[in-house]
Image (cartoon, rainbow, N blue to C red):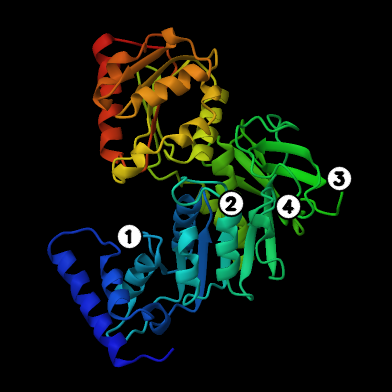
Amino acid sequence: MKKNLRFIIALWISKAAMLLQKLLGMNASYFPGKIAIKLCPDFLGRIDKPETVITVTGTNGKTTCCNMLLDVLGENGFDVLNNKAGSNVDAGIASSLISDASLFGRVKKKIAVFEVDERSSLKIYAYVHPDYAVCTNLFRDSIGRNAHTEFISSIIEKALPDDTFMILNADDPISSQLKPDNKRKYFSLARLDSDGTECRNIINDVRCCPKCGGKIEYEFVRYHHIGKMHCTECDFKSPEPDFCAVPDWDKGTFTVQTADGVEEYPLMSASKFNTYNQITVVALLRTFGLSAEAIAASFAHMSIVKSRYTKLEKNGIEVITNMTKGQNPVACSIVFDYIREEEGTKEVVVMLDDKTYRETTEIVTWVFDADFEFLNDESISRVVACGVRVHDYHLRLLLAGIPEEKLRCVENEQDAPSQLILDGTDKVFILHDLTTPDETKRVRDGVLAEIEKRGASK
């Protein structure tokens, strides 16, 4: 699209809004982009784009993958445009382009990595043409937006261009089917000792063949519908991966089997889900042309973003905060399962209320789709539920079979530390929502202070 007077006016006004935000000390946001699109609805189509555009979408893991991509590319000399400071909707991407553009809409950076909200695909891909599109996975998400996987996958399928190179999860029978005629590479996590052949989760969105409706058989199932499978009645099966990761938890590394041989990378955490994030990044960057050595060197000193995961120690007790995405039963179940598999005696603080979108706090159906049963484990000595929906969590924990004597319930999150046992505990997990970073920090500090006050130790 050519630039017209309406576009120029929208660009200048949105740039002025961005400058005003900076002068007032306000954090960057999607607001300038929102103004630009309001004044010029096809603004994204008229502003220039970098020569190479990478987009990352999916239900879980897209933010972490984008952060990794930005870190690795930045360390290897690439000046990367991104929408990290704005948002993953069309206005957020517009804001990032505005920040880099000249007064006439020419962008300076040569490469962009954009996180894309699944529901925003139609608005974004109509104007932003990705050279590479990553989809981490597709699950049912918050019931008010993304509760049906076929609905979400159909939006992405319709929106993406036919010549975009796809980077897809071979272990996900939903996202792996996107844009079947496009060029693609698949990533996978090899069978683990903890994998089974029957789904243990309440939710499984692929209970029958997506092609013919026949019976699905799993070679292995990891969680929900993630695994390797085939149909007993037609030719549908999981695709063979181009990048297959094999983690060595004890060594702290994972190897990747490719057509060219075996590569080794440092693990950033002993989590299956974060290993998926890392192999996703490896698949994209190796396809993009970066060397295995360069990627491994960057991984060696990277860590998960602190707003999503932190770990501190006091008197030998580890205090861990883990972003667990309330309203998302799949994300919660994955974290519950991870905690169950961790070694030692554990206590868990459940504070999953959404403090930004207050109306969604009233929607509690997701609680009954999440596998709270994973917290019913001998290694977990106490579960403290808190927040305005504490009684809903209490009921769900009881339905999961957790004995009443293991449970404590407080409405004020700041009261949670006093309800912990602590003495003889190895790890305290604080499970929090994306929208409560300050509250989470205060609870974490409260736990550390409680350990100090009591002289508790493992």
Q: What secondary structure is found at the residue carrying circle 2?
A: helix
Q: Circle 1 is placed at which residue position? A: 85
Q: What secondary structure is found at the residue carrying circle 1?
A: loop
Percent across and percent down for residue 366 are 47, 36
Q: Which amino acid does label 3 sit on?
A: Thr
Classify 277 as above or below 456.
below
Q: What secondary structure is found at the residue carrying circle 3?
A: loop
Q: What residue type is labelled 1?
A: Ala
Query: Are there few (<14), some (14-19), or many (20+) residues within 10 Å of tag 2?
Result: some
Q: Which residue is drawn at 59% across and 74% down?
A: 161
Question: Could one spot residue 432 in this view of the protein?
Answer: yes
Choose between 195 and 329: the one closer to the eye. 329
Asked whether the residues under the numbered discs 3 and 4 touch, taking CB atoms below 8 Å apart as contact, a structural biologist would say no
Asked whether the residues under the numbered discs 4 and 1 touch, taking CB atoms below 8 Å apart as contact, a structural biologist would say no
**Quadrant containing the C terminus in the rendered view:** top left
Q: Circle 4 is placed at which residue position? A: 210
**Quadrant containing the N terminus in the rendered view:** bottom left
Classify 247 as above or below 184.
above
Q: How far apart are marks 4 and 1 (CA)?
A: 38 Å
Dot 1 or dot 2, earlier in sequence: 1
Which of the two discs, 4 and 1, sits closer to the camera? Answer: 4
Q: In this view, does 228 lie to the left or right of 420?
A: right
Q: Residue furthest left?
A: 24
Asked whether the residues under the numbered discs 3 and 2 touch, taking CB atoms below 8 Å apart as contact, a structural biologist would say no
Q: How far apart are marks 4 and 2 (CA)?
A: 12 Å
Query: Are there few (<14), some (14-19), or many (20+) residues within 10 Å of tag 1?
Result: some
Which of the two discs, 1 and 2, sits closer to the camera? Answer: 2
Q: Which mark is residue 149?
A: 2
Choose between 214 and 454: the one closer to the eye. 214
Percent across and percent down for residue 235 are 85, 54
